[in-house]
Structure formats: structure tokens, C-alpha cells
Amino acid sequence: MTTDKNTKNDVVIKVSDLQKSFGSLAVLNGINTEIKKGEVVVVIGPSGSGKSTFLRCLNRLEEPTGGIIEFEGINITDKKTNINKHREKMGMVFQQFNLFNNHTILKNITLAPVMLGHMTKKEAEEKAMALLKRVGLADKANAYPSQLSGGQKQRVAIVRALAMDPEVMLFDEPTSALDPEMVGEVLDVMKELARSGMTMVVVTHEMGFAKEVGTRVIFMDEGIIMEENTPAEFFGNPQNPRLKEFLSKVLM
Amino acid sequence: MILKPMSIINLFNDLKEEFIFNFIDGNRWKWLVEGLGVTLQVTFFSVLLGIAIGVVLALIRSTHDTNISTISNPVARNLLRFANMIAKIYLTVIRGTPVVVQLMLIYYVILVSVDSKILVASLAFGINSGAYVAEIVRSGIMSIDKGQFEAGRSLGLSYTQTMTKIVIPQALKNVLPALANEFIVLLKETSVSGYVALQDLTKAGDLIRSRTYSAFMPLIAVALIYLVLVLFFTKLVGILERRLRNSDH
């Protein structure tokens, strides 16, 4: 254990030659990258570039058709690994929030930790309330998802993932389904999370977020990583012509 | 029943006589009560069996249709394919043949040695209802947004945990009206139990008719009892529906 503690501290997710195709349609054509502990990696790219598919492959919500994903040094693309165990450590936030409609906000957050034996019901509820307070939604604990606004739902969804104490948080376009005036409240929570040292992979169209809190920005197109760099270099001195074109369209 | 030149009093007296003749004489009302008991028992057990079969079939069918590509174990995958095929055959055969024929086949051919007619009828109607419940529940499962399932799995919950805690409760709530409808149909379908000489409510009414040679009273009585049962059941489902709706807007 001591030997791989270094790698564990360093690289959280290692992706080697990741491929994914839906039938004859190739979406990912060999992705190679590493996500290090504490990094906030922002993935951008035109729609259809495969960035969401890439993210969803990381916790195998999509089954990769080729390549290897290692999480904390363990090959999770191996069919023999129990993916559920690893998913407990990879929080995910969806574009459409996906709160459990049949449960209260509190139950949404405590369901998994209690069911998977991480905490007692009481511990989980205390933790949930503390987290809800942190995102300013403690008064919504007993409400149902349908009673919340989009921004509130997404903050709860972030809390739900955090309640599992994940090693890494995956965000799949977390603000794309929100009304414009609610984008800010969700980004604020994500920024705070980034500053607290959480390892994050964020697929987004929010260039401001990428510049402000990203430690690395990845540009994907045609199922491969076209360019990756620090935000300053990425936005200030883009190399790839496709990226230049993309940035000229979105940054105005 | 002979209607004399009209007066309300006469009509009332005639009805009263008819009533006494059909139900009070020879304690024939007891047949109806016993028949009602049989009908309720058969309906109760077949509803339970129908739900059990239906949910299992619906899970097999919907898992096969939406998730087979995510199953990595080839043995499990083939097992699911096989189960799905069996489920499809079951649905085709049961939905493609009349329930009376199924009942008689089970009673006279398949379970000849079983003595309890209530058991045989419950099995027959339960097996029949299971096919319809399966499609209702499947439509419910399919109606739940895929994101609900993915959110559960992304937290580390297993397939079974996600289905039982998140997907199925929402699916059942959505299909409650359709399920209630199926059970009302089932209750009334048991009226063909007489085909295997099981004395249910309908058969009891018919028995009275065959003794008294008077059809009006016993058949109306039987019809009214079914109607009251259905009204009661509908009311119950209404309360349940309202309670479920209140719990999550």
C-alpha cells in the first residue's frame, strides 16, 4: 500500500487510448490524459465533440469500447472490477440534475451513504444538513425536487454527490439546463468546491469558469484531445486552428 | 315476475315476494355469501400472483431492452436473453388465448390431481393477469427518465438497489390507474370460474336461478354486489393515488 500511495496522491484518474463507438459511429478516438489530485480540469469543445461521452466513460456510465481507465491505480475498465465500489468515490453531477423525484431533498442526499453502509442514518442526516447549509438550502431539506428551482436542484445534486466523500467530482454541463439568472449560484458552489481542493473534471461552456478556477483546460474535437494547457496559455495563446476558430466563436 | 296494472305498492310487494322467494326461502342468500367469499379469495390470490409475475416479467423485459449492452458477463447476458425470450412467449400465449380456455386447460389438463378449485382458479387468473400487469409495469419503468437510473448508479448503488429504491416506486405510481383498471377487470373475470364448477358469486346467482326459475332477482343481486365491490375498490385506489400525489407533487 505504501508504494502506491504516491501514485494515489498524485494521479487520480489515468486515461489511456480511450475509445468509444456507438455502432459504427466513433465518438472517442483515443483519449490520453491524467487527472491529478486537486486539479480542476475543464473540458470544452463543440457539441458532438465527445466531451460528455468522455466524462461518462470515466465512471463507466458509458462502457468504453477500447482503452484503459485507471482510477487510483486500479483498472476500472477491466470487466472484473466492481464498478459500483469505485463509483462511490466518483461523484457525478448531471446537466438535468436527476434528483430522485420520489424522495425528499434530505433523502436524496442520505439515500446512497446509508444504503451503502458508509454512515448511519443519523450521521448521514447531520452531514446532509451541514452540506445543505453550506449551499444555502438547509430550509429545503423536507421539500421534494419538484418544489425547487433549477439552480436549487443543481446545488442539491452537488451536495448529494459530495455526501459520498468522493475523490473526484465529474460535472456534465452542470449549468447548461439552467435559466441564465441561476447559472451564477451553481458556479459559485463549484468555485468554492474547487478552492477547497476537490479534484474536478468539468465539461462546460462556461469560459469564465474555465479561466477563473480551471487549473487545466482541455479542448476536444472529433473525439480526441486537440489541445490542453493552463487557462492563461489556453485562452491567451491557442495553437490549434480548430481551437482558435472555436474560441473566436464563443468568446465575444 | 308479473307486473299487474301499475301501482307502486303492488310493484313493491311483488319485489318483496320475489326477494323472499329467491333469497330467504331455503336460506339461499347463504349461497351468495359463500360465492362472494370464493370470488374475493380467488381475486385476492390472483392479484398477488399477477403482481409478482408481472413485476418480474417487466424487469426482465425492460432490463433486456435498455441495459443488456452494459452487462459484461457473457453468461449473464445469455441468461437474460433466454429469460426475455421466455417472457415474450409467455406474453404471446397468455394474451393470445381466452382466459376461460386457460382456466379449463389448467383444471382439466395440467393440474388434474389438484383438489382445491380455489387454488386452481387463483393460479389460472394470476397467470393470466401477470401477462397484463407485466406490460403495464414495463410501460411504467420505461416512462421513468433514464437520468434517474444513471444518478442512482453514479452514486455507487447497484442495479437492484437503484431499481427498488428509485425507478420502480416512481413507475408504480405512474401506472397505478392502469393497474387498478387491470384488477377491476380481473375481479369480474373470475365470474367464469363456474366453467370448472367452482361456486363463485356468479355461479351462486346462477344456481339460485336454476332452483327458483326466476332470473331477475339473483342476477340483479349478483350484478349489484360486483358493482359495490368495484366502487369500493375504486374509492380505495383513489385514496391511495391522492396520498402518493401529496407525498411528491
Image: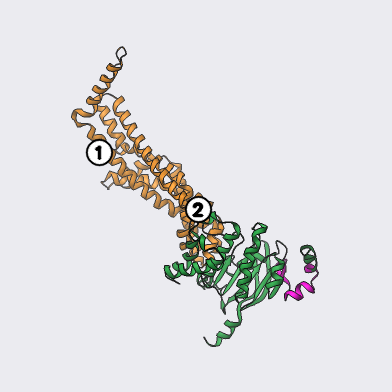
Chain colours: A green, B orange
**Element carrying mark 2:** helix
Residue B99 percent location from the top left of the image: 39, 40
Q: Is residue A86 above or below residue A185?
A: below
Q: Give the residue pinned by disc 1.
A: B34
Query: Which mark is on residue A58?
Result: none
Residue A223 location, quadrant: bottom right
From the viewer's perspective, tell me whether residue B150 is left or right of residue B168: right
Where are the magenta residues, as a range? A218-243
**Element carrying mark 1:** helix
Q: Amino acid at mark 1?
A: Glu
Residue B165 percent location from the top left of the image: 46, 60
Q: Amino acid at mark 2?
A: Ile
Q: Residue at x 53, y 57 (%)?
A: A145
Taking the view exactly as shown, the residue that stands out farthest to the bottom is A3
From the viewer's perspective, tell me whether residue B89 is left or right of residue B41: right
| Residue A225 colored in magenta in the image | yes
Q: Earlier in the sequence, mark 1 or mark 2?
A: 1
Query: In the rendered view of the protein, which quadrant contains the C terminus of chain A?
Result: bottom right
From the viewer's perspective, tell me whether residue A52 is left or right of residue A241: left
Can residue B109 be seen here? The reply is no
* Mark 2 belongs to chain: B
Residue A212 location, quadrant: bottom right
| Residue B98 colored in magenta in the image | no
Query: Which mark is on residue B141?
Result: 2
Q: Is residue B168 above or below residue A194?
A: above
* Mark 1 belongs to chain: B
Residue A13 percent location from the top left of the image: 61, 76
Q: Residue at x 28, y 17 (%)?
A: B9
Residue B7 percent location from the top left of the image: 30, 14
